[in-house]
Structures are given as C-alpha cells and as structure tokens.
Image (cartoon, rainbow, N blue to C red):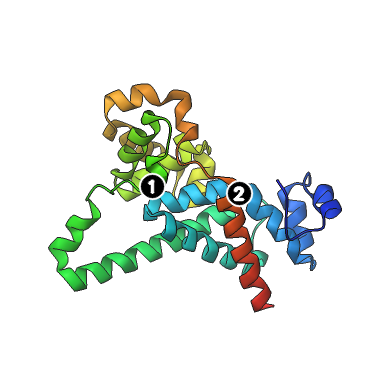
Amino acid sequence: MAHPGLDRDAAEVVSTLPDAEIVRRIRAGDGPLFEILMRRHNQRVYRAARAIVKDETEAEDVRQQAYINAFVHLEQYQERAQFSTWPTRIVVNEALARRQKQIAQRSSERGDEHGVLMEFRAPQPDPERQAYAQELRRVLEDAVDLLPDGYRTVFMLRDIEGMSTAETGEGLGIGEEAVKTRLHRARAMIRRSVEARIGSEAAGAFPFHAPRCDRVVRAVLDRLAKMA
C-alpha cells in the first residue's frame, strides 16, 4: 500500500522495519514515520473502536483522536510490550469515554430508563453492511453487536481480530483470566447456529478497506501538522 506522507524510496526502506525501531526513529525526530505505524495497525484499532461505539462514523472519530493521543504521548510507550497493544489500549479508553458521555447525555435528555433501553436496541443496518456479499457475516456482526460491551470487545479482539489472550488483556487493561472468562461467556451468548458456522468467515467480518485507512491516516497527519 502506498504511503502518501512519505517519499517512495523512504517508505520502501522503513516498511520492513519492526515497530520498535520505527518508534525509536519517531522519537528521534522522524515524525512522518508515524504513518507507517498507523497503516500497520489500522484494522486492529478500527475493530477495537467499532466493538465499543458500534457506529462507523463515531469509530472513525475515535480512531483519529486515539492516534493523536498515541503520537503526543509516544514517550510513554514501553518497548517491553508489543506496539500493537499501545494504540489498542488508547483507542479502547477513548471509545469507552466517548460512549459513557453519550449514555449520560441520552439519560439526561430522555430519562434514565429510556436511555438504558436505547443501549440494548439492535442497531439498524447501514448501507455498507447491506452491501456485504456474505449473509453469514451480516448475521455474525449483528450477533456481536448485541453482546454486552465488555464481552463484545473481548470477542472482537480475540476471535475476529485474532489477538492472543495476553495481547487482549494488555490492550484492555485486564487480566488473562478475565479475558478467558469473558470470551467464554461471549461465545455462549451467540446463537449456537451462528457459532457453528463462523469458522474461517470470522476473520472477514468488519472489513477495513483501503479508502477508509487512507482517510483516517490523512486526517491524523493533517491534525498533527497543525499541532507542530
């Protein structure tokens, strides 16, 4: 994939470097290399945000802010952990904070009882979802969306994104046993017929297409340029 913010030759050189080395170069002043990290981890960050806010536009806003936060506080990243858990944890925190704010606003505007009920209402399919070719993916996504927040996020990161138990726990700030418990309960909540069919199709759910990646990267780079 092309990297609009980088010279082509430079992009080819750094594209094979490990995350830790790229982070070190960014800390040394090579800020444009942050684009490489965003593109490497955009799908995982998207899926983490989408699991919490359940809205495509909101998930995009959350990801942009999370990347800004990650860049500004990059000195806090500890290299003993995989870099992928760093933006994942940041986007999870940003998404949870955004969701809590929305819940509070709805509760104050419509009354506590109505606000709570709204949180459990099944989401209406958007045009992008209607365009999915596979019915199984639509059924799986609907089932995942109806899971309680904590279980949905763990299921998304473990079974759909394929993160390990340790990576998921570190990204969410919970222990591995908690990850295993939530994953077990999440699977049990999904209808048996869906669980029996997901198999290899699970990895294709909630796809993250190149135009969406480019849009988020450009928006983040523009905001970082204004902050410089």
Residue at 75% x, 46% y is: 18
Vertical placement of residue 77 versus 101, above or below? above
Which marked residue is nearer to the observer: mark 2 or mark 1?
1
**Mark 2 or mark 1: whose residue is earlier in sequence:** 2
Q: Position of residue 90 (x, y in %)?
A: 52, 60
Residue at 32% x, 40% y is: 142
Q: CA distance from mark 2 to mark 1?
A: 25 Å
The residue indicated by pointer 2 is 41
The amino acid type of the residue labelled 2 equals His
Task: Classify mark 1: residues with Cα within 10 Å, few (<14), some (14-19) or many (20+).
Answer: few
Position of residue 190 in the picture relative to residue 63 (left or right):
left
The numbered dot on residue 189 is none
Position of residue 169 in the picture relative to residue 109 (left or right):
right
Vertical placement of residue 227 versus 87, above or below? below
Position of residue 143 in the picture relative to residue 117 (left or right):
right
| Quadrant holding the C terminus | bottom right
Q: Position of residue 165 (x, y in %)?
A: 49, 38
Position of residue 8 in the picture relative to residue 188 (left or right):
right
The amino acid type of the residue labelled 1 equals Pro
The residue indicated by pointer 1 is 127
Residue at 49% x, 34% y is: 204
